[in-house]
Amino acid sequence: MFKSRKVHEEDAWDGIVIDKTREAPDGSNHYHYVEVRLQDGTTKKARIDKALWESLATGDRLVKEAGTTAAVKAHP
């Protein structure tokens, strides 16, 4: 079954980037994904916009708060 990787407004999470990938599943559109290790030790793969994807490196912290439409890079 298909599992959406799109970030939903009601989602809330906080984690460390462990991987970055790009995919073109339909052959024409590139989607940018990050895999993050959440504070409880589980991992989550989420689709993010290109500008944020380009600014991230492995080890950076991302925070997605409920009520927002996108995750943001947390500043130390």
Image (spheres, grey):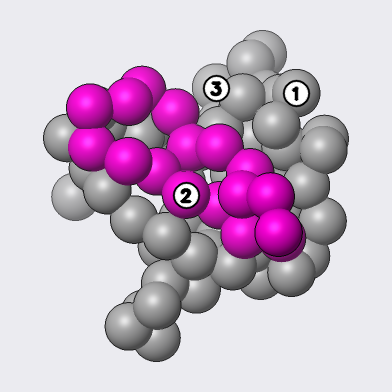
Q: Residue at x 48, y 37 (%)?
A: 71
Give left or right: position of 4 versus 60.
left
Q: Which mark is residue 51?
A: 1
Q: Identify the residue under disc 3.
A: 26
Q: Secondary structure at mark 1?
A: helix
- Residue 62's place in the image compared with 40, above or below, is above
Quick check: can you spot residue 2? no
Question: Label 3 near label 2: C-beta < 8 Å?
Answer: no
- Residue 25 percent across, percent down from the top left: 56, 31
Give left or right: position of 21 versus 43.
right
Q: Magenta part of the protein: which range?
A: 60-76
Q: Identify the residue under disc 2.
A: 63
Q: Residue furthest front?
A: 76
Q: Quadrant of residue 16?
A: bottom right
Which badge, 2 or 1, comes first in the chain's sequence?
A: 1
- Estimate how packed mark 2 is, as few (under 14), some (14 to 19) or many (20 or more) residues with alpha carbons within 10 Å: some
Q: Amino acid at mark 1?
A: Ala
Q: Residue at x 49, y 65 (%)?
A: 15
Distance from Cα at disc 2 to Cα at disc 3: 28 Å
Q: Amino acid at mark 2?
A: Val
